[in-house]
Amino acid sequence: MKRAMFLGTIVLVVLAVVMVSWKTGSAAKNQVKTAPQIGYIAPDFTLTDINGKKVTLSEVYSGNKVTVLNFWATWCPPCRAEIPELSKLYQKYRSQKLALLAVDLQEASGNVKNFAADNGMKFSVLLDGTGEVGGVYQVYSIPSTFILDRNGRIRDVIIGSTNLKTLEVKIQPLLREK
């Protein structure tokens, strides 16, 4: 009798382990993928800019351009503070094959277009109205900036506000690479 109870307990434990393993395995399949990481190709996307033009990330960097990908919003004070720095960077390095894509997260296109005009944003301002691209990049804090080399590989990530000097230190070596 004790032997039967012992064997029954063993069978129940094995079944419980199998069920937990099966449940965990299926849950792992549904987990969110990890955020884009330094050293890996940036996830591609296509968004519309404030002028209605479709812009695809891979087409930008495949034009042999170092790309600064900045996630921001008009209501975000640190984002607003770094816009003049981004503008200076773009003006200074655009002739050296630097692209700057500012991805606005989940705001109305008219508001973003007016804000960009009022703030002299001459670089590409893209609209991520649903937040889908921000989700793919797992942007949980804005501003967030991804620096891509000419092959679309993420070479650096800046979480929080940045400035011209910091950006120059990060992009100048990439601009010199062939």
Image: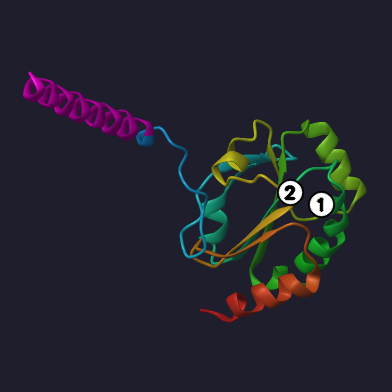
- The amino acid at mark 2 is Ile
* Magenta residue span: 1-27
Question: Residue 178 in the image: x percent, y percent?
Answer: 51, 79
Instruction: Provide the residue designation for mark 2.
Output: 142
Front residue (pair 159, 12): 12
Name the residue furthest front. 2
Q: Taking 38 as reference, is 126 left or right?
A: right
Q: Say if mark 1 contacts mark 2, CB within 8 Å.
A: yes
Question: First in sequence: mark 1 or mark 2?
Answer: 1
| Kind of residue at disc 1 | Cys
Residue, x 54% and y 79% (percent of image)? 177
The answer to which quarter of the image holds residue 46 is top right
For image coordinates 48% across by 48% down, the residue present is 34
Q: Which residue is mark 1?
A: 79
Any magenta on residue 9? yes
Q: Residue at x 46, y 60 (%)?
A: 40
Closer to the camera in the image, 120 or 85: 85
Q: Residues within 10 Å of mark 1 (few under 14, many from 20)?
A: many
Q: Is residue 52 left or right of residue 65?
A: right
Q: How far across and how far down the image is residue 118, in percent?
A: 92, 47
Magenta span dominant secondary structure: helix
Residue 156 located left or right of residue 14: right
Q: Nearer the viewer, residue 153 or 177?
A: 153
Image-quadrant location for residue 4: top left
Q: Position of residue 55 (x, y in %)?
A: 61, 46
The CA distance from mark 1 to mark 2 is 7 Å
